[in-house]
Image (spheres, helix red, strand yellow):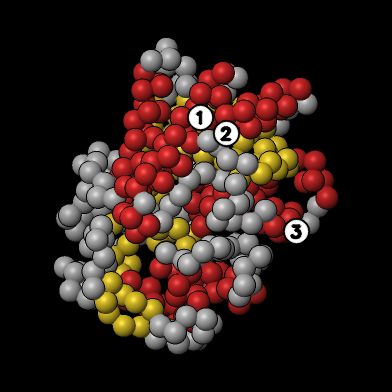
Amino acid sequence: MKNILITGGTGYIGSHTCLALLKRGFNLTIIDSNINSSSLSISRVKKILKDEYYDEKIVFFKGDIRDKKFLDEIFLNSIKQNNRIQGVIHFAGLKAVSESLFQPLVYWENNVYGSICLFEIMGKYDCKNIVFSSSASIYKNNSLKPILETSEIKPCTPYGQTKVAIENILEGIFKTSSNSWRIANLRYFNPIGAHESGLIGENPLSTPNNLFPIVCRVADGSICELQIFGNDWPTNDGTPVRDYIHIMDLAEAHCAGLDFLFKNKPQFINLNVGTGIGTSVLELVNKFMEVNNCRIPYKYSQKRLGDLPFVVAENKLITSILEWRPKRNIEQMCRDGWQWQKNNPNGF
């Protein structure tokens, strides 16, 4: 079976994708710096699978993708072990939108320079299949309509700008390499929830920036109340509307994307990954309280720089091209996410 390199593989999305890939029979080479994740997620993935056989299918290296020597040794070692890396899913990078506003150079160095190092080593070892973890934050979208892959690209934060830059680099590689690469940019929206076992989930080591882990921590009492940024947005209840997708649906989309690349001719594709259903922040909070029978105190605060009123995917392209569609609803996202938080109040 093919050996796939997962950068950022011990993180939230990475760990769930590793689980989904292992279930499909892939061998995995995982690298992560663990600056905002824990390598313990790998042992939890093995625990979910309940089979020691998977020990032989996973290799983990702690390190930074900005270190080309580190990357070179990993690719070379895979060849020596007769387990050549044949494809990459690239998650590694910094992802706090608000933090990027205050530390833009840190984001450009980590996300863009790190990606350049990775792509150079991939080219050196003739590994030309990659699924890139992009983001809906690249879109301008000041309207209240679902976002198409052809919608205007105009990110308003350094985080989103780095994602666009990486997509542009990959497009340049494709166009100038005799079209020999297979590249899929997955532009996903708002992943939340956790694996239904409650053994793996979102585990930010620093102060959480995303809404859902904060909701969970308010529910368990470790944070006093939730701040909702603005209640006068042009939406039904005045709070921002987002397209929330279950983390396992997102993980399975990466598997489907990888399968598609391996089965088809070299190409460069951009795909939105979302449910196509908009849920407001207030609707999410109320649904979480209803499903989990708990209380979420909240207050309204000033709008944040870079926020948008409505960010929902038009997902017809991905559901028509890939053998994938989202299966899990908002109730399951809330239930699974709370199960993870209850089981792991302090993370891994």
Assess disc 2: are there few (<14), some (14-19) or many (≥20) residues with their C-alpha within 10 Å of its C-alpha: few
Q: Amino acid at mark 1?
A: Cys
Q: In terms of depth relative to the viewer, which is nearer, 281 or 331?
A: 281
Q: Are marks 2 and 1 in contact (CB under 8 Å)?
A: yes
Q: Secondary structure at mark 3?
A: helix
Q: Quadrant of residue 83?
A: top right
Residue at horizontal 62 percent and vertical 41 percent from the top: 63
Q: Quadrant of residue 2?
A: top right
Above/below status of 344 relative to 179: below
Does label 3 or label 2 sit earlier along the sequence?
Answer: 3
Q: Is residue 325 something one can see in this rendering?
A: no
Q: As drawn, is 121 to the left or to the right of 223?
A: right
Q: Quote the CA–CA distance across marks 2 and 1.
A: 7 Å
Give the residue pinned by disc 2: 67
Where is residue 325 drawn, in percent x and y?
45, 50
Give the residue pinned by disc 3: 47
Give the residue pinned by disc 1: 117
Q: Quadrant of residue 295?
A: bottom left
Count of marks overlaid on the render: 3
Where is residue 23 drawn, in percent x and y?
68, 47
Q: Quote the CA–CA distance across marks 3 and 1.
A: 33 Å
Q: Amino acid at mark 2?
A: Asp
Residue at horizontal 57 percent and vertical 49 percent from the top: 14
Assess disc 3: are there few (<14), some (14-19) or many (≥20) residues with their C-alpha within 10 Å of its C-alpha: few
Residue at horizontal 52 percent and vertical 44 percent from the top: 92
Q: In terms of depth relative to the viewer, which is nearer, 304 or 282?
A: 304
Q: Quote the CA–CA distance across marks 3 and 2.
A: 31 Å
Say which mark, if any, is on residue 275: none
